Image (spheres, rainbow, N blue to C red):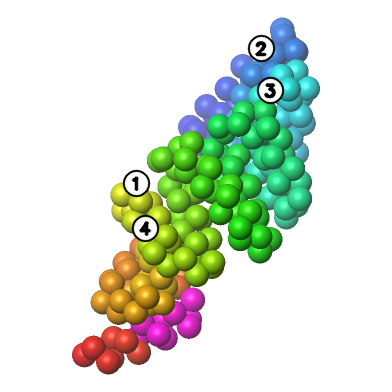
């Protein structure tokens, strides 16, 4: 309750600032982020578009608009907004990360890898991009690269469930049973919903080893 009250107070303050200076893109953006926090998506979208109109170089606003597109299943819109973000700011890792995620969802693995490699180049702490890149390498059959990238992700966040799942799959394909079981068990411990076929393969290996 307190958090919601604080958010409403912040929103009221931002609205007052905008009333006094309606051409301030940053204020529109700040208001939009607060509205997003309260899941008021339509109002947030209006403010994000106002932010861009006032400050066309506000790359973060394009990324947030891309996120709203993704929320409603508009992959093309998400991609377009994030491409605009990295055009405005060429080293914007979050924009590249989102492009990579969408391209992977669309089955464009090479394009996804290119974007995700850029995302991790510009931000070597971007754990989600490392995790998605490892998955892209795995889908491409680049097992060593996938394992190496997953390990980088775990250096940043050791308890990232999807990374342990990716490592379990990569190690299975590589034939490293012990490591596959280890990462599978950790993914399960962390609450990850491992695919049934992977679970069956791991349990078969476990029975063979016992």
Over which residues does the magenta segment extend? Answer: 195-203
Compared with 45, 103 (above or below) is below
Q: Which mark is residue 156?
A: 1
SS for dot 1:
helix
Query: How far, Cα to Cα, is label 1 from label 2?
Result: 38 Å
Compared with 151, 23 (above or below) is above
**Mark 3 and mark 2 in contact (Cβ < 8 Å)?**
no
Q: Which mark is residue 17?
A: 2
Residue 101 image offset from top left, x and y in percent = 59, 53
Within 10 Å of the Cα at label 3, are there few (<14), some (14-19), or many (20+) other Cα atoms? some
Nearer to us: label 1 or label 2: 1
Instruction: Please report whichever mark, 4 or 1, sits nearer to the chain's N-terminal start.
Output: 4
Instruction: Please report whichever mark, 2 or 3, sits nearer to the chain's N-terminal start.
Output: 2
Within 10 Å of the Cα at label 2, are there few (<14), some (14-19), or many (20+) other Cα atoms? some
Query: How far, Cα to Cα, is label 2 from label 3?
Result: 20 Å
Query: How far, Cα to Cα, is label 2 from label 4?
Result: 48 Å
Nearer to us: label 4 or label 3: 4
Q: Residue furthest top?
A: 20
Residue 47 image offset from top left, x and y in percent = 73, 28
Is 207 part of what is drawn in magenta? no
Q: How many numbered marks, from 0 up?
A: 4
Work out which quarter of the rendered image holds the C terminus and state it.
Answer: bottom left
Residue 63 picture quarter: top right
Query: How far, Cα to Cα, is label 4 from label 1?
Result: 13 Å
Magenta span main SS: helix
SS for dot 4:
helix
Please name the residue that numbered disc 4 is placed on: 148
Q: Residue at x 69, y 40 (%)?
A: 83
Q: Can residue 44 be seen?
A: no
């Amino acid at each position: 309750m307190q958090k919601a009250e604080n958010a409403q107070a912040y929103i009221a303050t931002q609205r007052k600032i905008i009333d006094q200076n309606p051409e301030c893109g940053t204020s529109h953006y700040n208001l939009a982020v607060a509205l997003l926090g309260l899941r008021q998506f339509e109002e947030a979208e209006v403010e994000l578009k106002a932010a861009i109109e006032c400050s066309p170089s506000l790359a973060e606003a394009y990324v947030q608009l891309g996120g709203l597109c993704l929320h409603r299943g508009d992959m093309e819109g998400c991609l377009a907004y994030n491409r605009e973000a990295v055009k405005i700011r060429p080293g914007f890792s979050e924009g590249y990360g989102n492009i990579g995620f969408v391209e992977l969802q669309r089955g464009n693995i090479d394009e996804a890898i290119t974007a995700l490699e850029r995302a991790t180049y510009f931000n070597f702490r971007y754990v989600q991009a490392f995790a998605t890149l490892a998955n892209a390498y795995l889908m491409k059959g680049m097992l060593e690269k996938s394992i190496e990238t997953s390990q980088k992700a775990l250096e940043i966040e050791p308890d990232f469930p999807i990374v342990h799942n990716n490592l379990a799959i990569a190690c299975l394909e590589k034939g490293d049973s012990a490591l596959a079981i280890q990462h599978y068990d950790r993914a399960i411990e962390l609450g990850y919903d491992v695919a049934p076929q992977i679970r069956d393969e791991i349990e078969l290996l476990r029975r063979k080893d016992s």
